[in-house]
Image: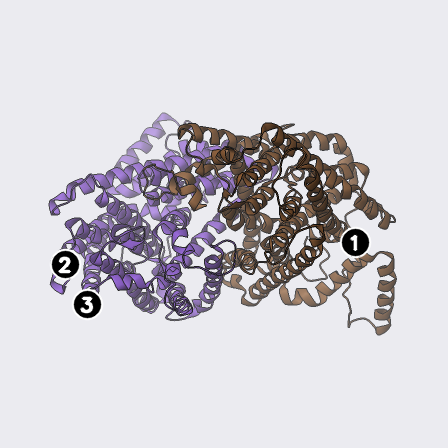
Chain colours: A purple, B brown
Amino acid sequence: MESGLIENVTLGSSYPLVVPISIIVAVLCLCIVIGHVVEESQWLNEFTVTVLIGFVIGTIILFWSKGKNSHILRFDEELFFVYLLPPIIFDAGFKVKKKQFFRNFSTIVLFGVFGCFLSSGIIAAGSWLLLPLVGLTGLKTREYFALGAIFSSTDTVSTLQVLKQDETPLLYSLVFGEGVVNDATSVVLLKAIQRPDISITDFKSVAPVIANFFYLFSMSTVLGVSVGLLTAYALKKINFAKDSTNNREIALIGLMSYLSYMLAELLNLSGILTVFLCGIIMSHYAYHNVSDGSKVTTKNSSSTMSNIAETFIFLYMGMDVLDIEKWNKSNSSFGTSLGVHVTIILLICLGRAAFVFPISALANYTNKSDERTRISLKSQIIIWWAGLMRGAVTIALAFSQFTYKGEAGDSVHATMVKDTLIIVLFTTVVLGSITKPLIKHLVPHHELNSESHGEQNSFIEDLNLPLLSPRVSTKTNILRAKNSLTMLIKKPIYTIHSFWRRFDDTYMRPVFGGPPPENSSRSE
Amino acid sequence: MESGLIENVTLGSSYPLVVPISIIVAVLCLCIVIGHVVEESQWLNEFTVTVLIGFVIGTIILFWSKGKNSHILRFDEELFFVYLLPPIIFDAGFKVKKKQFFRNFSTIVLFGVFGCFLSSGIIAAGSWLLLPLVGLTGLKTREYFALGAIFSSTDTVSTLQVLKQDETPLLYSLVFGEGVVNDATSVVLLKAIQRPDISITDFKSVAPVIANFFYLFSMSTVLGVSVGLLTAYALKKINFAKDSTNNREIALIGLMSYLSYMLAELLNLSGILTVFLCGIIMSHYAYHNVSDGSKVTTKNSSSTMSNIAETFIFLYMGMDVLDIEKWNKSNSSFGTSLGVHVTIILLICLGRAAFVFPISALANYTNKSDERTRISLKSQIIIWWAGLMRGAVTIALAFSQFTYKGEAGDSVHATMVKDTLIIVLFTTVVLGSITKPLIKHLVPHHELNSESHGEQNSFIEDLNLPLLSPRVSTKTNILRAKNSLTMLIKKPIYTIHSFWRRFDDTYMRPVFGGPPPENSSRSE
């Protein structure tokens, strides 16, 4: 941030950061107020408005500094990955409705991981075939791979703003879950592609990339879960709140989560995946070991920080378009640029369609006995649409691929950064504006309400049985095991989920914290 | 921060900040846990331990990097003033017990402003006379003035940790209040001294410095109060929480407070004073306009951030001692250094004694009718002792006076920075360790409890009457006014306070928010 923001600032304070921070904090306040005001609007959403405000502020700064002050406007990759992304992803993990998330786990992972792979492949192959036809040449094979990963990263926030978790739990859970898993997958995938020790010359290099991907994925998972469990254990053992000084609890949850992200980055793993899992573990165990005040505070301040970071990113995106240097460096013609935009947007639509509808059909087929997890065609269209928007992660990935310390190396790279930005803005502002009316049209309010019926207390009964209980006879235990086996064959996911819950109640919660198992109102 | 931390870091991540952040976050977690553990200890306090941990970590880093990696250890003035100080001072304002604070307002201001001036004068004159005698020469007149301001900035945190607000409300309020007012005064005073347009050649230059001081003081007050009232008004009008999305409230309180600090710095005023007053206004008005969840969250996250920032500062102080470059640049002999340390510490003791005891006597004389506000001799000793410790503000001021971008210009300046650091560490670690047993000795626990009797409901009765009420007859109003006038002569502060409360209830709270006046359990 600093390198970008410090330069060219000449107002009269002793600390050069004071000017940009003042401007940005003031504008953030404005965005928060306006975001609240437009909430009732039919077309606008908070983040579209924020991007537009960013654009207006950027224009003012540009004129005020007579066309020179472009550095305050530039999107900074390090600021994004070190300060802004961690709170957003942690909060996503922290507030994930775990029951819904894990019940639809297989579908979400298929969407988020397999779908991201397929979409990457289609976009990579498509742009390798089509981009030279519209006049853009000079990209290497590795860069086509990278393009696939960059443009497979979705941004579902504007859809999630419209959907209501209580009204359409299944749809919300799928869109939310896919969004988070997709974030992690696309970042890890690009990381795997960028590994210098893997030579990528043609499309046969896919195998080592995928191997690397799974290495990063599993190691990041282990790290995130470990840090989360360690924190939960420490909070349970130390029991800070006994004399009602609960600041240390809050500080420890926040700092340890941030540490998990930083450690992952330090070890060249995926910080995003790590901090997401850390967030899940924190809300599942650590959350229950702190005082009530700390619970409220942790939840609210996590979501406040996430909200501020998100607003800041959209603001920055709006301002970044006006970074003149990028425009000067790129020398592609208007026709070529337009061709690139149209090609990539079409590939994005195609790439998503290629997996959303088949995976939904597959999910419906395997769950055909269970009406509650059926994905209707309208829901499928919403899922498809939700993932068409591209956001801040896409921009950050493009910067990490095509620039070095914020500067594009050559004309092709400058063009790719500029085009990424335009595509992101187009999808955020134009497609984002259509989202609200589209969803209202596809899922009218009365239908929204009906979907949630019969959802509530259906899974709870047998889930609260402990896995193996010393309190009942061996015979009962064996009978239970038999029943479980039959269930496992009939309803694999459901049964694994129920196994996990029993394991959790019997072995994990007593050590790491959580409400006692006999309490049937389990935490979400 | 970045310029200091980035350099010389060579581990394998893509973002250079990742390594120092990981180290510092991990050590912060350690300090939080250990700080909890030593809470019961007789001698150690949280912050002494933190300084020692910082020293150990610094030594490890120094050995690990073979004596070269001193940059990660260096105290960064900008990091301190831009990121760490604002949350600490805001929290001080936010959690000030306003009734106590304003009831003892005159005494607190005498201690904090007049005392700081007197102490500055004594230290400045004393070091001008004595430092050349112990062998330190080369300081200009302005620099002697600056030394006075730098070493008049107290750090009362280790005393406040031992005192209990509920047991000794008067003593706590005086120590806390003086600490905050003193912070603001010393920073503003140094700012006034550093103004380049004022020529300081001899001790007659005091007048323009004082004039400048009052300009800065009043403008910062206006700014802080305005931003606070604006936020309170916006929160009351917009009423974010009506649909239970209360993140925006929390974000707005946090961002506006930070903005007040930044605007003050931008306008070359005192950010510390501004954000302190903004915190008071926020807790007095804005706090009452938000939802319950936001109240808990704002209070807890403010104090958590303040705590983390404080811990970080003490940690950094411990690490900063090992910044080798400073040691190399200073060429004063051991004897001179020791002479400087002893001289300044003696001047600090003398400077405090010169105002604590006289002002206490004055306060006792004017309030002789009121037993509750009598400052006993033991309390006076504690007040005197509480202000002997020097802390992070002193270091930051020394850096701002004697270095340019973290580098000392010449040998004398390097010596002053080094000596400041040693004096701060000595007072924090040695005097800080004596604080706990000293206070326990002077104010045994049973006595602590007795002081609070008869404090509770005595001031409330007449304070809740509105200033002018249309509901009672003119005669009653005139009678009330007459009574008030008699009171004003007898008990000036008490009466001004009561006038203010009526004005507040009648005009301010209806516009800016707060509990209704008939509710006698007024917010603190």
Disc 3 crowd rating (10 Å Cα; few below 14, some 14-19, many 20+) is few
Mark whose residue sits in front, 3 or 1 = 3
The structure residue drawn at horizontal position 51% and vertical position 60%, both measured from the top left corner, is A12
Picture quadrant where residue A327 is located: bottom left
**Residue B475 in view in this figure:** yes
Residue A102 picture location, percent across and down: 33, 45
Give the SS element for disc 2: loop
Q: Which mark is residue A137?
A: 2
**Tag 3's secondary structure?**
loop
Q: Position of residue B346 (x, y in %)?
A: 71, 35
Q: Which mark is residue A333?
A: 3
**Cβ–Cβ below 8 Å for labels 3 and 1?**
no
Disc 3 and disc 2 in contact, CB within 8 angstroms: no
Q: What element carries label 1?
A: loop
Question: Same subunit under labels 3 and 2?
Answer: yes
User: Subunit of mark 2?
Assistant: A
